[in-house]
Image: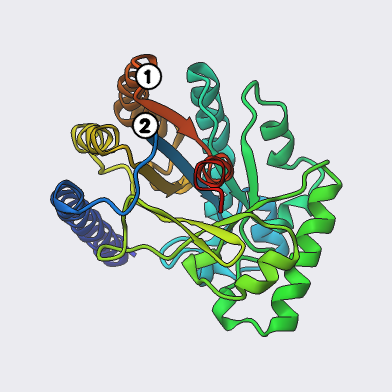
Amino acid sequence: MRVYITVRRSLDELYISMSIVGSFLSQLYHFVAFRLEKPKMRLEMGMFIISIDVDVGSKELGVINRGRNDRNVNRNISEYRVGEIEEAALPLFVETFNDFEIPVTFAIRGQLTELKDSILELLLESSVKHDIGAHGYYHRKFTDLSRNEAENELKMILRGMKRFGIIPRTFVFPVNSVDHLNLLEKYGYKCYRGCGGLMNDCMYIEKCGELYNIHPSIYIDQHTKFSFLKKFLDVSTKKRLPFHVWFHLWNFAQDEGHLQRSIDNIFVRLFNYAKRKEKSGILTFETMFSSAEKVEKVTGL
């Protein structure tokens, strides 16, 4: 047992070290790329967009699913544990967004509409009107689903969301597996987040058919530095481009104490800086849905 614990701790430390290095290299690459990239669009001012993937949202789903979906959610921790972390994380993030009056996009897993004490109620009671979008029903890859399976998930999402008075207009594909866009159009969605990654992230919104692809700009976690994000916002305001940050609720710690420190060290500092830009009239805070509406209004497309 002692050997197992030692090996497990060593593997965890190695994973953390690799994550730190990977995060630093990603931030460095993105900063250089965004500085040098020729803009594909020009807005009236910079946009700051945040989208959050709620992969589980409740430890109860981990019990219901009996571990069948563990690896499709997280390769290192169970679906139950992810739900437990997200249950603790969501109120802290919602409180922070309320304090700064910042609307964001929450991509919600449809299964959460089956639960009595759903986090959807917390979002609906928020003093800020957030964009509550969909993140699949069972968090399955849409690239692995047939058309009928994908359509069934969209029907279940719509039926479940309606019980909370929500009609989702934003879609974030589980595991960023973009597919069945024609079905999103059929079920009234206006925008989605395309597949990003180190070489594909950008500051750009494009229309694909009747949908708007709100491209991701960067994926962040607890190792992301405020100083880097500050520079990205500078690029956004200088070039008048959308800066779209995304993350999971479990990206910033596995306990409430460390999570609060991550929020204070990254988000509180970032929001204070971004609010000054908003006050100067060079930046707006947008959700995925509101950014699509603004681009549609400006371009007329």
Q: Secondary structure at mark 1?
A: loop
Q: Position of residue 184 (x, y in %)?
A: 67, 66
- Residue 220, x across and y down, in percent: 33, 47
Tell me the kind of residue under disc 2.
Answer: Met
Q: Earlier in the sequence, mark 1 or mark 2?
A: 2
Q: Quadrant of residue 187?
A: bottom right
- The correct choice, above or below, for 216 with respect to 200 in the image is above
Label 2 packing within 10 angstroms: few (<14), some (14-19), many (20+): some
Classify 43 as above or below 139. Answer: above
Colour approach in the figure: rainbow
Q: Is residue 58 visible?
A: no
Cβ–Cβ below 8 Å for labels 1 and 2? yes
Q: Is residue 231 visible?
A: yes
* Residue 105 drawn above or below residue 101: below
Q: Measure the C-alpha gap from mark 1 to mark 2.
A: 8 Å
Residue at 59 percent of width and 60 percent of height: 211
Q: Please name whichever residue, 212 or 196, is drawn nearer the observer in this view of the structure.
A: 212
- Which residue sits at x=20%, y=38%? 228
Residue position marked by numbered label 1 in the rendering: 281
Q: Amino acid at mark 1?
A: Gly
- Residue ID for mark 2: 45
